[in-house]
Image: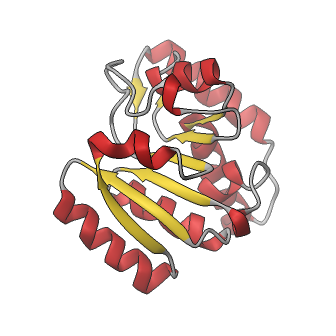
Amino acid sequence: GVVGCLYSYVSGQACKALVLGAGGSAAAALYALGKMGVRRAYIANRTIGRAERLAERAGRLFGLSCEVVELGRAPEAASRVEIIVNATPLGLTYSEAPIGEKDLTPSHVVLDMVYSHRPTPLRLAAEAAGATYVDGVRMLVEQGAASVRILLGIEPDKRVMEGAVRSWLRRRGETWS
């Protein structure tokens, strides 16, 4: 899902990334970024020990050179990267974004793994800064489409899939991560 979302926006060879979070979604994002050719990543997390363990695994398994930063220092790390991935639940409750508008530029590509029926704080910040924003629905659709291709050998209509997911989210009135 991450590769499908970001591939058309970035040439991974020259890119650096900031991943917010250190759980399973963050690990999947780092794997995908490594597949795209990204070789340098910053991992920002509340729990430094967990981020350090993920950084070690990402280096060993995905060939990424990772630096761990405290979540509060994520805006500083954002100034050194082209890709930002939010793999945290921040934004689920419409609290403050982990990265603000002042920390983003039009050259940033922001993937927010939260999928919602309404704009998240990170989306509002990214759009206000002129950054490219990719939401979690797009990632979910890319994951689903890849599964259909692998399991059934057919190319699904991603527009139909995306419409169905967005319709479901609106009906439910919920936000997911």
Image coords of residue 89 (percent x, y): 33, 37
Q: Quadrant of residue 22?
A: bottom left
In the rendered image, is residue 91 in sight?
yes
Where is residue 144 drawn, in percent x and y? 62, 50
- Occupied quadrant, residue 111: top right
- What is the residue that sits farthest to the bottom in this orientation? 60
Check the picture and name the quadrant holding the C terminus. top left
Q: Is residue 88 left or right of residue 41?
A: left
Q: Residue at x 44, y 53 (%)?
A: 19
Residue 170, compared with residue 68, is above or below; it is above
The answer, for residue 1, to whether it is visible in the render is: no
The image position of residue 45, as x and y in percent, is 28, 51
Q: Residue at x 69, y 36 (%)?
A: 161
Left or right relative to 101: residue 131: right
Q: Is residue 74 above or below residue 55?
A: above
Q: Position of residue 147 (x, y in %)?
A: 63, 60
Determine the image quadrant of residue 39. Answer: bottom right
Vertical side of 89 occupied by 2: above or below: below
Q: Residue at x 43, y 59 (%)?
A: 42
Q: Quadrant of the N terminus?
A: bottom right
As drawn, 30 above or below 76 = below
Along the viewing direction, whichever of 106 and 174 lies nearer the viewer: 106
Please state the total of marks drawn on the protein image: 0
- Relative depth, front residue between 176 and 95: 95
